[in-house]
Amino acid sequence: MSTIRELLVELTGTAEYADAVDDDTDLAASGIDSGDLVRLVLLIEQRLGVEIAPEDMAELHTIADYERFVARHSVAGATGGV
């Protein structure tokens, strides 16, 4: 299970939602509300140490989007932004 899926399980309290959503499915269209999306961002920031600015949130719609964002920013942070 991907890191973002694991955080979705924690957020929703069940694996059913995370298992039912494809990587490329828009999370908002799949039934998760805006408050849960904000809580997902907070979990990502707290657990993974990746900051997500409000303008970045506008570009993050799917699990795959979040995974790519975290991977890019984790690598950039680990290498000092190089």
Image: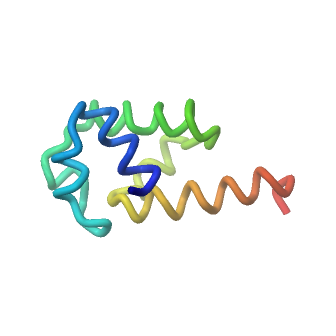
Which residue appears at 16% of the width and 57% of the height?
A: 20
Residue 48 appears at what percent x and percent y? 59, 41
Residue 14 spot, x, y in % from top left:
21, 37
- Res 19 → quadrant: bottom left
Quarter of the picture containing the N terminus is bottom left
Q: Residue furthest bottom?
A: 24
Q: Is residue 32 above or below residue 24?
A: above
Whole-percent x, y for residue 73 in the image: 66, 55
The foreground one among 82 and 14 is 14
Residue 9, quarter of the rendered image: top left
Residue 65 percent across, percent down from the top left: 43, 62
Relative horizontal placement of residue 56, taking residue 80 as reference (left or right): left
Q: How many marks?
A: 0
Left or right for 16, reference 76: left
Image quadrant in which the C terminus is located: bottom right
- The residue drawn where x is 13% and y is 46% is 31
